Image: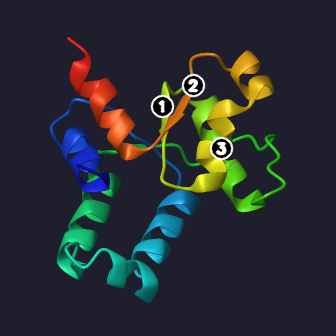
């Protein structure tokens, strides 16, 4: 299970995904990188385009987000945190190491105790355990 399974949960209506135009653009760019395409050969171009289209169609659009979170290690990732905070999200799902490392950040946890930063597998386990 992985990112495609997470998108399948969205398509089935079991989760809500908040989408910001810059984030979707970054995801599209990432999925088309040769290094990524080589690593995940089983996810062909059609499957990638299909998942991206599902996110566009079924995601909840958030056209603008108040910027405020600072992430020194990778400033471009701050938008993911800002979107999660702005939407009062329960989960931020990512494979990005800089974002996943924030799950141990005590200051972030104290300010936003309901936000869990997890990888796709942890997310699917949590979502599928819900009654």
**Residue 130 pos. (x, y %):** 25, 16
User: Which residue position is annotated with label 3?
Assistant: 101
Identify the residue at horizontal 47%, vertical 61% (top origin).
Answer: 24
Q: Residues within 10 Å of mark 2 (few under 14, many from 20)?
A: some
User: Which residue position is annotated with label 1?
Assistant: 91
Distance in Å between CA atoms under marks 1 and 3: 14 Å
Distance in Å between CA atoms under marks 2 and 1: 5 Å
Q: Nearer the viewer, residue 77 or 12?
A: 77
**Residue 68 pos. (x, y %):** 81, 40
Q: Residue furthest top?
A: 131
Q: Residues within 10 Å of mark 3 (few under 14, many from 20)?
A: few
Residue 94 left/right relative to 69? left
Q: Tell me if I can see residue 47 in this picture.
A: yes
Residue 32 left/right relative to 96? left
Q: Tell me if I can see residue 33 in this picture.
A: no
Distance in Å between CA atoms under marks 2 and 3: 13 Å
Viewer-side label of 2, 3:
3
User: Which residue position is annotated with label 2?
Assistant: 115
First of labels 2, 1 by sequence position: 1
Identify the residue at horizontal 64%, vertical 30% (top origin).
Answer: 85
Identify the residue at horizontal 25%, vertical 55% (top origin).
Answer: 4
Q: Residue furthest bottom?
A: 34
**Residue 122 pos. (x, y %):** 37, 35
Circle 2/circle 3 CB separation < 8 Å: no
Badge 3 element: helix
Circle 2/circle 1 CB separation < 8 Å: yes
Residue 131 found in image quarter: top left
Badge 1 element: strand
Badge 2 element: loop
Q: Is residue 16 above or below residue 114?
A: below
**Residue 121 pos. (x, y %):** 33, 42
Q: Residues within 10 Å of mark 1 (few under 14, many from 20)?
A: some
């Amino acid at each position: 299970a992985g990112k495609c399974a997470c998108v399948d949960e969205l398509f089935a209506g079991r989760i809500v995904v908040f989408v910001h135009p810059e984030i979707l653009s970054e995801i599209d760019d990432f999925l088309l990188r040769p290094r990524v395409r080589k690593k995940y050969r089983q996810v062909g171009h059609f499957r990638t385009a299909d998942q991206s289209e599902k996110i566009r169609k079924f995601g909840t659009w958030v056209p603008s987000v108040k910027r405020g979170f600072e992430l020194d290690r990778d400033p471009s990732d701050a938008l993911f945190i800002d979107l999660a905070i702005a939407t009062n999200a329960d989960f931020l799902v990512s494979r990005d190491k800089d974002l996943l490392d924030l799950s141990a950040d005590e200051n972030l946890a104290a300010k936003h105790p309901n936000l869990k930063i997890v990888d796709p597998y942890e997310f699917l386990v949590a979502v599928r355990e819900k009654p």
